[in-house]
Image (cartoon, helix red, strand yellow):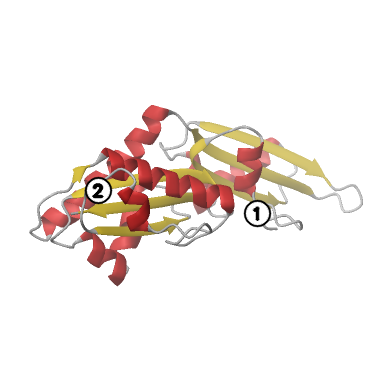
Amino acid sequence: MTAMTSRGVCVYQRVIGSGFAYLTVGEHLVSGPRTAAEFVAYCLRTDGPRRRQYDPAFTHAGLAHVHDGPSGDVYWTALWARPFTPDGLAGTTAAVIDLTNRERTRHGLPPLSADPPLTTAAQAHSADRVARGFYAHTAPDGSRPWGRAAAGSTRRSIGENLACGQRSPADVVEGWMNSPGHRATILKPGFTHIGVGFAGGGRAGMYWTQLFGG
């Protein structure tokens, strides 16, 4: 079983397509349990589903199953999510900034200040990657980080980190810090300001952007 259909549509695209905008989402697909009680028991004794059931980041859940008549198998899909809200987005991006600044402080560097124009540009790039299905610093229309930032920011030097698929601020910052190039951008002494963007959807599920300025 896979989270991608034979037509190339993934579970994240289905969730967004149903009208449920989210800040984070997790899924589990399984066959075997015959009843809801058996499915819940399976989840409680299996590491991945058990973690999702008890993850405080999730506030909503959905469960569905279908029976395959000839084989008698039962196929289950479970989804856990936190719905999108403006306050939730602000909290998510603020957490990324806080974790980024902890890394800078730990390495003897001053913290970065949130910058509204950089935030606007970062958020737009995350949303654009979901909408147009690409993963790159250069958008299909040819726009690049410094051009997007220049639309509203006065920062003279610009840097950008991208990521997709990570389900939390902690996961995405850890991933960046484990990547030499992204780590160097986070720890660049000349940067003084930051904007963070996040969008849910697309094939990877979560799209993150850090835009730095100095």
- Which labelled disc corresponds to residue 194? 2
Image location (x, y in percent) of residue 165? 48, 55
* Residue 174 at least partly seen: yes
Q: Relative to 138, is 191 on the left or the right?
A: left
Residue that sits furthest to the right in the current view: 70
Q: Is residue 61 left or right of residue 163?
A: right
Q: Provide the secondary structure element on which disc 2 rests.
A: strand
Residue labelled with disc 1: 3
Residue drawn 44% across the image and 28% down it: 85
Q: Residue at x 34, y 46 (%)?
A: 151
**Res. 40 in view:** no
Residue sitting nearer the eye, 4 or 120: 120
In the rendering, at what x and y percent does residue 131 appear? 57, 47
Q: Quadrant of the N terminus?
A: bottom right
**152 over 207 or under it: above or below:** above
Foreground of the two, 142 or 59: 142
Q: Is 165 left, or right, of 6 in this rendering?
A: left
Kind of residue sitting beneath label 1: Ala
Q: Secondary structure at mark 1?
A: loop
- What residue lies at 49% left-to-right and 45% top-to-bottom? 127
Amino acid type, label 2: Ile
Quadrant housing residue 21 = top right
Residues at badges 1 and 2 in contact (C-beta under 8 Å)? no
User: Is tag 1's residue or tag 2's residue first in the polypeptide sequence?
Assistant: 1
Asked if residue 77 lies left or right of residue 125, the reply is right
The one nearer the camera, 139 or 33, is 139
The C terminus, quarter of image: bottom left
Q: Choose top left, top right, bottom left or bottom right for residue 86.
A: top left
Q: Callout 1 environment at 10 Å: few (<14), some (14 to 19), or many (20+)?
A: some
